Image (cartoon, rainbow, N blue to C red):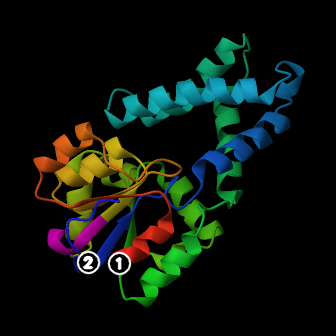
Amino acid sequence: MSVKKKKRYKNIFFDLDNTIWDFNTNSYEALKIAFKKNNLHKDIPDFNDFFSTYEGINTQLWESYRNKGISKSQLIIERFGKTFDTFGLSHDALNFNNDYLQAMPGQKALVDNAFEVLEYLKSKGYQLFIITNGFKEVQLKKLEQSGLAHYFIRIFVSEEVKSHKPDKVIFEYALKSSNSRKQSSLMVGDSWEVDVLGALNAGIDQVHFNLGGSDSISEKERGYIRHSKTATYRINNLKQLKLFL
């Protein structure tokens, strides 16, 4: 973990998926529910084949959506439409997507130590916020049904703001709307490209939550850091936030 110097932060902005809410686990389980509901096992014996195919397609489409290459409706249709095409199926992609999104908020797996760390930060008087890419109706339900919502003063969803991380517009909007100063704010997220570089370019200090990975910073990454006036940290367990907050 790299720490330039201990600073007094007041406002902590968290990413949601795979930073606090365990998206990988929950998405897998929600997709399994939709898969079973739609009797896809009759055509695709191995659910994991379906899941891995969908994951690759969905990742590419989300990148295009963030870059404004496709619309929300295109993303919703194409991520399952293209997956079904891969398996030679003509299933209703929109209905399947609805089943998947309905099952998603009911999955409540969190990243290890999420509640403990949020309780700690709240007890220390930090103001907590969420900045998340995603669909408003789904992200808000995730927070409510998992018991996370009450920790956060405000939730900034890319669809509502009409700007997606890593675009600095969503970070600047969150700062202004929460009456937060850059100098006393910190962004915590699992994606180096989306959360860390996005916040860095917006002039906000960042924590890269590199779950399961090394907490050291590569020479390439140091190149970005050297040209920034912000502080960059890396952790591989949320509990490490307690070391400097």
Quadrant assignment, res 90 = top right
Q: 147 or 245: which is nearer to us?
A: 245
- Viewer-side label of 2, 1: 1
Residue 89 in the image: above or below residue 18? above
Residue 120 place in picture, x, y as percent: 48, 83
Q: Is residue 182 magenta?
A: yes
Q: Quadrant of the C terminus?
A: bottom left
Q: Secondary structure at mark 2?
A: loop
182 left or right of 166?
Answer: left
Residue 73 lies left or right of residue 96; in this view the side is left
Q: Is residue 170 left or right of residue 14?
A: left
Report x, y in % for residue 201: 17, 49
Circle 1: is it few (<14), some (14-19), or many (20+) Cα within 10 Å?
some
Q: Residue at x 54, y 24 (%)?
A: 57
Q: Earlier in the sequence, mark 2 or mark 1?
A: 2
- The residue identified by callout 2 is 9
Q: Which label sits on residue 245?
A: 1
For label 1, the SS is: loop
x and y percent of residue 140 in the render?
A: 53, 62
**Three-letter residue code for mark 2:** Tyr
Q: Residue at x 45, y 89 (%)?
A: 123
Can the viewer see residue 27? Answer: yes
Asked if labels 1 and 2 touch by Cβ distance under 8 angstroms, the answer is: yes
Relative to 64, is 36 above or below? below
Q: Callout 1, which amino acid?
A: Leu
Q: Which residues are magenta?
A: 180-186
